């Protein structure tokens, strides 16, 4: 299958300013995703989608050609990933290049490994919409998630509330944002949150760290320092 690797990197980050090009362990954050993509694809099949000239310059400084600058209407706070991915697919289609599937690698997952991507790719089939990496959820609706009932009293979110030990409750999972292997035909029909044929690929908590705040960044730096 012909695969496009997409690394979306908007310039207007608020939680961690300029995070996509901020050095982490001596490498710009976006560099971790570029290096992982290069384990699987030639540079011609790796697309950094950005609206920011500095981000584009950092990617090109690593030898990766940035094929286009994302238009302004795809660089707002309200623009979703779905529109960005469709724009990339259409860009290559207009050049006469059509892909069967897409691997979405968000720059905020620097501890994602080659092996994590390999596992996700191995689970992909043409009859599904997407393989998505997950981690075990920090909170469990069968055990410690509650919602107010019609009287305003808290009740367990799911189940009968009889679980007294977390390890006895059914496991639940949350997206970790690291790897998405997407059927492009499915993508053309609907956004990712509408997919029903989703297959999960479990990742470790360590590899699942997602950088969204300065606290997350501090944790990542400490992890890198410990690994040294």
Image (spheres, rainbow, N blue to C red):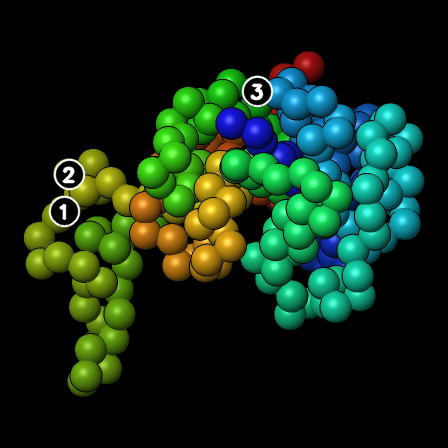
**Which of 7/71 is in front?**
71
Q: Residue at x 57, y 20 (%)?
A: 114
Specify the label residue 164 is tagged with. Answer: 1
Is residue 164 visible from the viewing direction of this image? yes
Pair 3/2: label in front: 3
Q: Residues within 10 Å of mark 2 (few under 14, many from 20)?
A: few
> In the current view of this chain or complex, which residue is farthest to the bottom?
151
Residue under label 2: 168
Measured from the top left, where is residue 16 in percent x and y? 73, 52
Estimate the x, y position of residue 177 in percent, counting from the top left. Answer: 52, 43
- Res 64 → quadrant: top right
Which labelled disc corresponds to residue 114?
Answer: 3
Q: Is residue 29 above or below residue 143?
A: above
Counting residues from the start of the chain, the first of labels 3 and 1 encountered is 3
Q: Determine the residue located farthest toward the front in the rendered image.
A: 96
Task: Please state if 196 lies on the left or on the right of 191 as rendered.
Answer: left
Tell me, yes or no, whether the two marked residues, 2 and 1, touch with CB atoms within 8 Å.
yes
Of circles 3 and 1, the one toward us is 3
Which badge, 3 or 2, comes first in the chain's sequence?
A: 3
Find residue 57 and report its image quarter.
Answer: top right
Of residues 66 and 162, the one nearer the viewer is 66
């Amino acid at each position: 299958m012909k695969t496009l690797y997409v690394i979306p990197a908007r310039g207007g980050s608020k939680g961690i300013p300029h995070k996509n090009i901020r050095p982490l362990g001596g490498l710009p954050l976006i560099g971790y995703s570029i290096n992982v993509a290069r384990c699987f694809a030639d540079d011609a099949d790796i697309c950094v989608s950005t609206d920011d000239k500095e981000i584009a310059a950092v990617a090109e400084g690593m030898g990766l050609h940035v094929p286009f600058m994302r238009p302004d209407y795809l660089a707002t706070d309200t623009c979703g990933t779905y529109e960005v991915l469709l724009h990339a697919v259409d860009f290559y289609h207009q050049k006469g290049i059509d892909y069967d599937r897409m691997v979405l690698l968000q720059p905020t997952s620097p501890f994602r490994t080659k092996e994590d991507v390999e596992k996700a790719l191995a689970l992909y089939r043409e009859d599904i919409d997407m393989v998505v990496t997950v981690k075990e959820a920090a909170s469990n609706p069968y055990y410690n998630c509650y919602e107010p009932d019609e009287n305003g009293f808290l009740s367990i979110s799911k189940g009968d509330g009889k679980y007294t030990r977390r390890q006895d409750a059914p496991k639940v999972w949350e997206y970790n944002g690291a790897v998405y292997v997407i059927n492009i035909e499915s993508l053309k029909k609907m956004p990712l949150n509408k997919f029903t044929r989703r297959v999960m690929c479990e990742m470790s908590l360590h590899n699942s760290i997602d950088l969204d705040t300065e606290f997350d960044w501090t944790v990542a730096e400490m992890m890198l320092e410990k690994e040294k």
